[in-house]
Image (tube, helix red, strand yellow):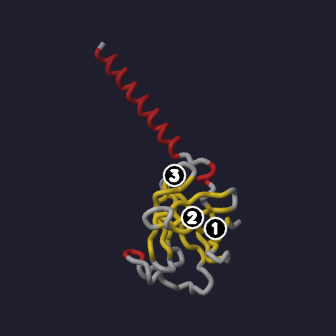
Amino acid sequence: MKATLRNCALACMAAALTFAGAGTLRAQQLNDKLQKAVGHWQVINNEGKPWGKVDTYLVDGKLYGKVTELRPGRQPNDMCEKCSGELKNKPLMGLVIIRNFHPGGDDWVGGTVIDPENGKEYKGKLWSVGDGKLSMRGYIGISMLGRTENWVRLK
C-alpha cells in the first residue's frame, strides 16, 4: 500500500511538472506582431532620410538590436566616444543599442536604447506596424517625454 501511494505521488508530481513546463513553453511563444519586430531595419532620421541600419534579434525571449551599417558621414572604425561605462570607445559597427526588451502585450517593453550620437541611454518601447515598419520610442522617465522613430524593414 505504501509503495502504491508513493508511486501515485511520484506520478502526480511528474504530471504537474509536465503541465507546468508546457505552460512555460506556451508563455514564451510570441504572437505575430511581436515576431514582426525581428529583422533587418533601415533607420529613418527625424528628417525622413535613411540614417543607418540595425538588425533586431531574440536572445532568451528578449529583443536586442545591433548596428549593421553606420549612418552617412560615419567611418567604419568610428567609436562610441560619447557612450559611458562598458560601451565607451567601443566600435559603433556591431554596437548593441537595443537591449533587454521583453513582450508586453503586442509591444516590446522594459528595455533600453542607446543613442550613439549622444551616448545617452533611454528607456524604450518598440512595436511593429504592419509587415514593413517598426516604431521605437525612446524616453527619459515617462514615455510622454521622448521621441519616436519609424524604421523600414529591409529585404
Q: Earlier in the sequence, mark 3 or mark 1?
A: 3
Q: Residue at x 69, y 56 (%)?
A: 130
Residue position marked by numbered label 1 in the rendering: 151
Type of amino acid under label 2: Met
Q: Secondary structure at mark 2?
A: strand
Residue position marked by numbered label 2 in the rendering: 136
129 vs 64, nearest the viewer = 129
The residues tagged by marks 2 and 3 sit, at their Cα atoms, a distance apart of: 14 Å
The residues tagged by marks 2 and 1 sit, at their Cα atoms, a distance apart of: 8 Å
Q: Residue at x 46, y 68 (%)?
A: 122
Badge 3 vs badge 1, beta-carbon distance below 8 Å:
no
Q: Secondary structure at mark 3?
A: strand
The residues tagged by marks 3 and 1 sit, at their Cα atoms, a distance apart of: 19 Å
Type of amino acid under label 3: Pro
Q: Residue at x 47, y 81 (%)?
A: 80
Binning the other alpha carbons within 10 Å of mark 3 as few (below 14), some (14 to 19) or many (20 upward) gives some
Residue position marked by numbered label 3 in the rendering: 103
28 vs 124, nearest the viewer = 124
Binning the other alpha carbons within 10 Å of mark 1 as few (below 14), some (14 to 19) or many (20 upward) gives many
Type of amino acid under label 1: Trp
When the figure is inspected, residue 12 is found, relative to residue 112, above or below; the finding is: above
Mark nearest the camera among 2 and 3 is 2
105 vs 17, nearest the viewer = 105
When the figure is inspected, residue 110 is found, relative to residue 40, above or below; the finding is: above
Where residue 108 appears, x then y in whole percent?
53, 56
Quarter of the image where the N terminus is located? top left
Q: Earlier in the sequence, mark 2 or mark 3?
A: 3
12 vs 75, nearest the viewer = 75
Badge 2 vs badge 1, beta-carbon distance below 8 Å:
yes
When the figure is inspected, residue 73 is found, relative to residue 63, above or below; the finding is: below
Quarter of the image where the C terminus is located? bottom right
Where residue 83 appears, x then y in whole percent?
43, 78
